[in-house]
Amino acid sequence: MGQLAREFQVTLRTLRFYEDRGLVSPKRDGTTRVYSRRDRARLKLVLMGKKVGFSLTEIREMLDLYDLKDGQIVQLRVALKRFQEQVDVLKDQRSDIEQAIEELERTVDVVAGMLREKETATG
C-alpha cells in the first residue's frame, strides 16, 4: 500500500478511505493489500476526477458504469455529458474568479493610494 501511496502521492489514509467507499478493491494477502491493474486505473481516474471537481459520489457512479457489458456506449455517453457539464461549471468558476481578481485589484489600488496619501501627509 505504501508504494501505491507514494506512486500516486496520496496518504495511506486516503487509500483506505477510497477502499471503504468501494472505489478500489484490493485483494488481501494476509494483512497486505494487493492492488490490481484495475485498482491502479480506478485510482488514477478517482484522482483525476477529484482534481477537476467531481465529488466522490459522481466519480463512483461513472466508475460503476465501466462494469456494464454494453460495449461502453452507455458509460461513454454518461461520461461525455458529465465532463461537458463540469467544463461548464469550471468555466463559470473561472469567470467568477476573474471578476473577483479584478475587483480586488481595484481595491488594492484604492487602498495603496490612500496609504500613500497618509504617508505623504505625515511624512
Image (cartoon, rainbow, N blue to C red):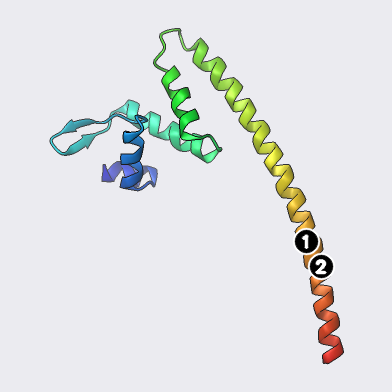
The residue carrying mark 2 is 109
Measure how far apart labels 1 and 2 are at the Cα level.
Answer: 6 Å
Please report the residue visible at 70 percent of the width from the left and 48 percent of the height from the top: 97
What SS does tag 1 mark? helix
Q: Name, please, the residue furthest toward the bottom.
A: 123
Q: How crowded is the residue under tag 2: few (<14 C-alpha within 10 Å), some, or many (20+)?
A: few
Q: Residues within 10 Å of mark 1 (few under 14, many from 20)?
A: few
Q: Are marks 1 and 2 in contact (CB under 8 Å)?
A: yes
**On the rendered structure, is 89 left or right of 14?**
right
Residue at (65, 38) in percent of width and height: 90
Q: Position of residue 7 (x, y in %)?
A: 35, 43
Give above or below for 109 relative to 100. below
Name the residue located 80 percent from the left edge and 73 percent from the top edge: 112
Vertical order, 70 against 43 (above or below): above
Residue 105's disc number: 1
The tag on residue 88 is none
Q: Quadrant of the N terminus?
A: top left
31 or 2: which is nearer to us?
Answer: 31
